[in-house]
Image (tube, helix red, strand yellow):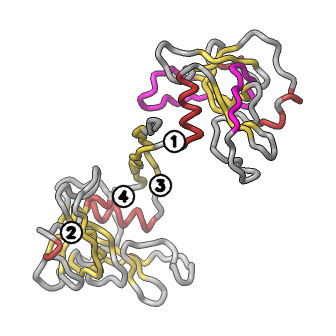
Amino acid sequence: MPEVLKAPLVVEFPFTRSLGPVQRAFLTGLRERVVLGVRTGDGRVLVPPVEYDPVTAEEIRDLVEVAPTGTVTTWAWNHEPRRGQPLDTPFAWVLVRLDGADTALLHALDAPGPDAVRAGMRVRVRWAGERSGAITDIACFEPYEGGEAGTSGHDGQFGDAVTGIVAQARLDYTYSPGRAQSAYIAALSGRRTVGERCPSCRKVYVPPRGACPTCGVATSEQVEVGPRGTVTTFCIVNIKAKNLDIEVPYVYAHIALDGAGLALHGRIGGIPYDQVRMGLRVEPVWADGARHPDHYRPTGEPDADYETYKELL
């Protein structure tokens, strides 16, 4: 039985967004230990607040302070917290309708076990020790036996309001290629590039996908392509990527390998970035022990005629 290939992959990036007047007030309020909602035209108070009424689509700006206490409407037990979640011990995800609100807020509830959680239980906000104007300023909710807590009557106006947030988006997963891509990866380890030909349209897909996305039929006929190819389109990268030891600026291009029916991605080296062009003929450069080309460099051949690769843009 062939080895089943798999590899851990992480996709992460900082997501930056500016805040409108309602979200700005809400997050600034959390920093100041104040929970704000917004009142709709029919009198409902929405928490978390939104800037447009979800029923009428009208803009809403009437900020209302609600209590830091509330009632659990529904919940789910999280027996194994993941990195970056509110608590590092098992906890409950809960929807809490804060006193004075008509909608529920999703957050974590610190409870000793699932038997201690129920719909209808009373809870209150546990504030984070250090607050910056983010939903994490609410560290979590905790069980509470009292009635509705008082409010300060805040009007939502702050002198030093939060104007934007940066959220660290991250996805950790394990990727396992199928038959077609496993054969492609195995060929690369031998410094060969192999695609698969569609039996219907005859297009050669590199990397192979196991099926033709145009015709919808399985592909199995292997075809070796390249190693040389033609730059079809490209971009100049000016922002250095995390954990990538390549100095900017550099060029990343679509390269149509000879014999392939579509272009693949590759970095262009061995030439100043401002001399890379469409039609440039390139060949792969392999690092010692590498299982894939490190980059592509010019071959010295005349540029390819546009008519030969225009269908591969």
Residue 7: x and y in percent read: 42, 38
Residue 120: x and y in percent read: 22, 85
Quarter of the figure with residue 62: bottom left
Decide: is 206 above or below 164: above
Of tags 1 and 3, the one toward the viewer is 1
> What's the residue at 76%, 35% (across, down)?
261
Please give the residue where the numbered disc 2 appears in the rendered image.
109
Residue type at the position of mark 1: Pro
| Lateral position of residue 268 relative to residue 39, left or right | right
SS assignment at label 3: strand
Cα distance, mark 3 to mark 4?
12 Å
Please give the residue where the numbered disc 3 appears in the rendered image.
18
Residue type at the position of mark 4: Ala
Cα distance, mark 1 to mark 2?
39 Å
Of tags 1 and 2, the one toward the viewer is 1
SS assignment at label 1: loop
| Lateral position of residue 103 relative to residue 305, left or right | left
Q: Earlier in the sequence, mark 1 or mark 4?
A: 4
Please give the residue where the numbered disc 1 appears in the rendered image.
177
Toward the top, the furthest residue is: 300
Cα distance, mark 2 to mark 3?
29 Å
Decide: is 305 above or below 301: below
Cα distance, mark 4 to mark 2?
28 Å
Residue 73: x and y in percent read: 29, 82
Residue 224 magenta = yes
Magenta stretch in the rendered image: 221-249
Residue 271 magenta = no
Please give the residue where the numbered disc 4 appears in the rendered image.
161
> What's the residue at 70%, 37% (across, down)?
221
